[in-house]
Image: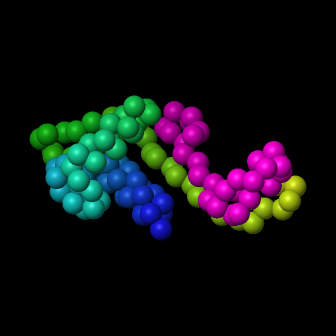
Amino acid sequence: MQLFKQIDRLNLLDKLISQKRTGKPESLARRLDLSVSRLARIIEYLRETGAPIQYDRALQTYFYEFDYRIFIQVSMQPLSDVDTRLYDAGGFSSMSFGMPVLGFVGGNGVAF
């Protein structure tokens, strides 16, 4: 499923940035199975949402300016009728069918 591939990709990106082991953008893009331009858009989006990502040309790696982590959680579970009404006000939504509930918490504690 594409969703899980993207989550794995972001988790790997976060791990490599945290360890200062990304390498050049070209090699990182290859490792993540992305184009260089797509990788640049992802990094820019993460920066816009508060991730303190920088690039060190001497070390040839991305890094976080200060302690920072990206946490992505996926929870899949059946919902009772009561829970379903609480989540979607009694109407039908993807949650009524047990689809994933996603959450993203940035380093600043803001949940998406």
Q: Is residue 55 left or right of residue 104?
A: left
Q: Nearer the viewer, residue 1 or 45?
A: 1
Q: Residue at x 80, y 55 (%)?
A: 84
Which residue range is magenta in the image? 84-112
**Image quadrant of residue 31?**
bottom left
The percent coordinates of residue 88 (x first, y second) are 76, 48
Residue lying at 37% horizontally and 34% vertically, measured from the top left: 47
Q: How many marks?
A: 0
| Colouring rule applied to residues | rainbow
At 67% from the left and 56% from the top, the residue drawn is: 94
- Image position of 32 (left or right of 51): left
The reply to whether residue 38 is in sight is yes
Residue farthest toward the left in the current orientation of the protein:
58
Residue 101: percent from left, percent from top: 63, 54
Quick one: which residue is furthest to the front in this view?
92
Q: Position of residue 108 (x, y in %)?
A: 51, 33
Picture quadrant where residue 6 is located: bottom left
Q: Which residue is situated farthest in the right direction here?
A: 82
Image quarter where the C terminus lies is top right
Q: For residue 5, which quarter of the picture? A: bottom left
User: Is 75 on the left or on the right of 19, as rendered?
Assistant: right
Q: Is residue 67 left or right of residue 27?
A: right
Residue 91 among those drawn in magenta: yes
Q: Nearer the viewer, residue 73 or 66?
A: 73
* Residue 28 visible in the snapshot: no
Q: Residue at x 16, y 52 (%)?
A: 26
In the image, is residue 106 part of the stretch drawn in magenta? yes
Q: Position of residue 8 (x, y in %)?
A: 42, 61
